[in-house]
Image: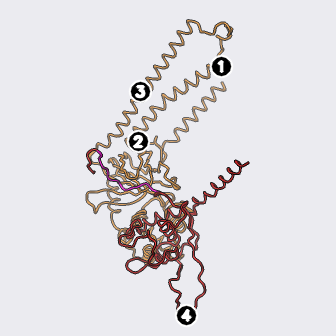
Chain colours: A red, B orange
Amino acid sequence: MRTVSAIACCSMLIVAGCQREKRDLRPSPARLAIFGDAARESPLRPGGPVEPQPVVTNPYNGSGYDISEGQRLYNWYNCSGCHSQGGGGIGPPLIKTEWIYGGEPENLFDTIVKGRPNGMPSWGGRIPEYQIWQIIAYVRSMNGLQPRSATSGRSDNIQSNPQTIVNRTTGVTK
Amino acid sequence: MNARRAAAALLAWGALLLTGCAGHQQSAVDPGGPQADRIADLFWFFVWPLTAVFVIVLGLTLWSLVRRHRGIEQEPLETTHLPSEKTETKLTRVVTGATIATVLILFVLLISSVLTGKAVADLGQTKNGMVIELTGNQWWWQVQYDNPDTSRVLVTANEIHIPVGRPVMISGRSNDVIHSFWIPNLHGKRDLIPSRVTTEWIEADRPGAFRGQCAEFCGLQHAHMALWVIAEPEAKFDAWLDQQLKPAATPTDPIKQHGEQVFLNNACEFCHSIRGTPAAGQVAPDLTHFGSRRGIAANTLPNSMGNLGGWIVDPQSVKPGNHMATIALKSEDLQPLLEYLESLK
């Protein structure tokens, strides 16, 4: 009896694990356009008090497929040009604990959509919203802010740059 | 009589099946070049003796099943089941003969196969070859015509034009996973492997359009990763190359101008490039002369304004899982964009 229930539990776990690979290939139309502010940077607003803002969540949290799509887009849209592979370069590093403009998904969304002073361009109206959320999912995964089960231990792609071949006997690089 | 009739029908059907291969796209027995010729010859050279062997072996098997079992009938099992001296000699002779014949046939096939491989590889010794760099991507082909004069290096996609009678070296790479370049009418397969360069020489000896298809499973849309090799007479090819090297014409009528602006002010230009405009994306097919190409989405659909509209509005319905971004175009922007892209001849 115990074996049976153990097997049942294991299979349920396995079935639940399939969610990680769930691919929502066609983004919902609501995610194609750019909407306004995802986060409020300041409680001060002109024209008196504002209604409470809806809570914004990243639709791609915990989705392995979307995190790896985010990784692809991170390089396609040349985020890596300034932020390197997260270690920073021209732009600040993205693997860190202190964020200048906030590290919550809605803050990152605003940063990408609106741009920030000193060089971060505004990508709003250019990159479709669902891809921005995929990039955010990836950037947060660099900091361990995505479930471990959803993040990949390695890149989905093989290293495709022709690698330097070192002759082991002569030490000559060609 | 019935069995004979069935056998005849089977043979006729088989022959019909084989003739079906000729004169068709993606057929290795309808050669369009010297190497495919050799490969097709080798194929037929294998097919006929092996068919004969197959028929003989099957015939003998059938005969052994239906013939009378004299030995068992004549001598009861308890006493002796050994064949007579005469039968023994006969059997030894037959088995030895069959073994020798098998070895001989396999040896002849081996030699012919090696000779074909050598003949096919010999094209690589030619000096006046043209080099085309072919890069596999999920799920399209980037084609780059190399030239010592860098202003004459051409980057295009999903369509290779080659001059008839001139050897062309396909220098293959991959940007992501292993793909395989295979134009059955011209040559065998060659894998495109990340971090490696693989080469294959092809040559067409008659004008024509030869379809090819990625031949190594490479992900969701492997089945929709096709390319055309179009062989043209030298003069026509040169004219094509000169035309393709030109930057895209600046549109003059307002609708196409609007379309160009739509292209440049959306996500399009992040991935695609159109020479002559600021669009310089490097990760998706070059669209400089998009209107002159046969197909869209790596030849998933024929190139027409309607198909292109469907592809841009909802790429995931045409090729689920592909990497083209779904963008929210305003309805009044779509038609100008289509007109602009199709005008890029």
Q: Secondary structure at mark 3?
A: helix
Foreground label between 4 and 2 = 4
Magenta includes A162?
A: yes
**Circle number at residue B108:** 3
**Which mark, by number, is residue B36?**
2
Quadrant of the rendering where the N terminus of chain B is positioned: top right
Q: Which mark is residue B66?
A: 1
Name the chain letter of the residue that bears numbered label 3. B
Of circles 4 and 3, the one toward us is: 4
The reply to the same-chain question for discs 2 and 3 is yes
The residue lying furthest to the bottom in this view is A47
The three-letter code of the residue at mark 1 reads Val
Q: Which residues are magenta?
A: A156-168
Q: CA distance from mark 2 to mark 1?
A: 44 Å
Q: Is residue B299 above or below residue A2?
A: below
- The three-letter amino acid code for the residue at tag 3 is Val
Question: Which of the image's four quarters has the C terminus of chain B?
Answer: bottom left
Mark 4, residue position: A47
In whole angstroms, how far apart are the C-alphas of marks 4 and 3? 93 Å
- Tag in front: 2 or 3: 3
Query: Could you tell me the amino acid type at mark 4?
Result: Gly
Would residue B148 be visible to someone looking at this image?
yes
Q: Secondary structure at mark 2?
A: helix
Return the residue found at the far right. A1
- The three-letter code of the residue at mark 2 reads Ala
Q: Nearer the viewer, residue B168 or B190?
A: B190
Element at label 1: helix
